[in-house]
Image: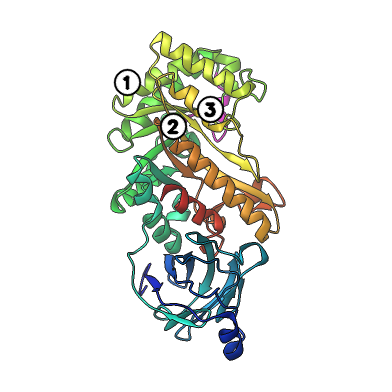
Amino acid sequence: MKSLFCALVLVLSVVVATPAATAAGNGWFGLEPGGPCKLTYSVPNDWGSGFTGAVSITNTGSAPITGWTLTFSFPGNQKITNGWNATWSQTSATALDWNRTIAPGATLSGLGFNATYSGANSPPAEFRLNGQLCNGSAPVAKPLRELAAAKGKYFGSAMTVSELEDTQNRVLTAREAGVITVGNEMKWDATEPSRGQFTFTGGDRITAGAVADGQRVRGHTLVWHSQTPQWVHDLPASELRQAMLDHIAAVAGHYRGKVFAWDVVNEAFEENGTRRQSFWQQKLGDGYIAEAFRAARAADPDAKLYYNDYNIDGLGAKSDAVYELVRSFKQQGVPIDGVGFQGHLLLGGVPASMQQNLQRFADLGVDVAITELDVRMTLPADSAKLAVQAADYGAVARACLAVARCVGMTTWALSDKHSWIPSVFPGQGAALPFDASFAPKPAYQALITAFG
């Protein structure tokens, strides 16, 4: 990939032409007389066959800008495929009704487009704002992993072996994610398909890939009612407990020193706050969760131990039940270090109480993390839905940033190509920050803005 994540800052500091002058020559909107401005162009993402361009316009003059058209000239191999917050063509962007006026001192940001290219992704030969030539240069945009780290958080992604083998996905994830959660390869059906017969091939591959890409690894998950072999379901209570303890000792022991955190128990509560009547609960009773945490601590004393669940992002019966579990564990000395809030959200469904909920768990003395974030919508996606999705992603990031003990957030893959949503929720999808062709969506820019 050439000219990866290049950026230009283009500053216009002359008195621009009046509307009459520019319209006469080119049919462009003009600025009010005497309106100097600054125009910033950057490429926040480049995935080898395409890129995202981002534009902002600052009115540094004393009079409002009452209309604008930005024109540009690419070298010839770039082709804009879609844009937002302006009317885009291959050579121009024109104001919409709602953003055609820029007050003195104000900055209009959020203008952008996706484009394809082949060969070198050279910057435009020139930009003109209402006919006036601009030029300059700027720093390279930072990826999410760096932006989050600068705020004391991490940004991560799930990863499976098939996703690791997808070169485009591997490159993207290496750039954007500082933490990898192993999607399936550390679950019981992958690690102990037959009793006492352990295999770690898949998990080891993902762990090695993460180390090579400078990423930390989250282990997922030791005890769950799903993706557990039938032989485990069939055990009598007297053997089931020992099988659980043996499994935790073997798996967490194998990855000791290689993972920094484990989702020890996953999804043990119903929506109404009662215990899920899984085979674990029916045969072992309430105590199995605490036993699992103690076994995990013995197997890896340095790993952070999490309880992980969905639909606990805001205040409610289910999150209340998990809160009481954590509170009781802290009182009893059960070794729990954190709570994972999965964040599998519906479009427009970020709970208003999310920050408050994260904070109350943090106040118990545990870390909190967004562990499996995606925001699904009814297909097909359109610009309005993508705008709502972007707002949702930004809201989740801001909630985490506002809570000191929120250590980071993970999306359940980065690209819609690898999303689990369409196979489980027919007619739903487009849930992740990058589309199926690895082009960034407005949700990605919302995350950049939140962490930036």
In the image, which disc is placed on residue 298?
1
> Would residue 62 be visible to someone looking at this image?
yes
Image quarter hosting the N terminus: bottom left
Tell us which disc is closer to us: 1 or 3: 3
Q: Which residues are magenta?
A: 222-235
Q: Residue at x 54, y 42 (%)?
A: 395
Q: Real-space Cα distance between discs 1 and 2?
A: 30 Å
Residue 66, position as x, y percentages in the image: 60, 69
Q: Residue at x 46, y 73 (%)?
A: 49
Q: Earlier in the sequence, mark 1 or mark 2?
A: 1
Q: Residue at x 47, y 14 (%)?
A: 327
Q: Secondary structure at mark 2?
A: loop
Q: Amino acid at mark 2?
A: Val
In the image, which disc is placed on residue 356?
3
Q: Give the camera-side residue of 324 and 266.
A: 324
Quarter of the figure with residue 134:
bottom left
Q: Amino acid at mark 1?
A: Ala
Tell me if mark 2 has few (under 14), some (14-19) or many (20+) residues whose alpha carbon lies within 10 angstroms of its own.
some
Residue 19, position as x, y percentages in the image: 59, 80
Q: Amino acid at mark 3?
A: Gln
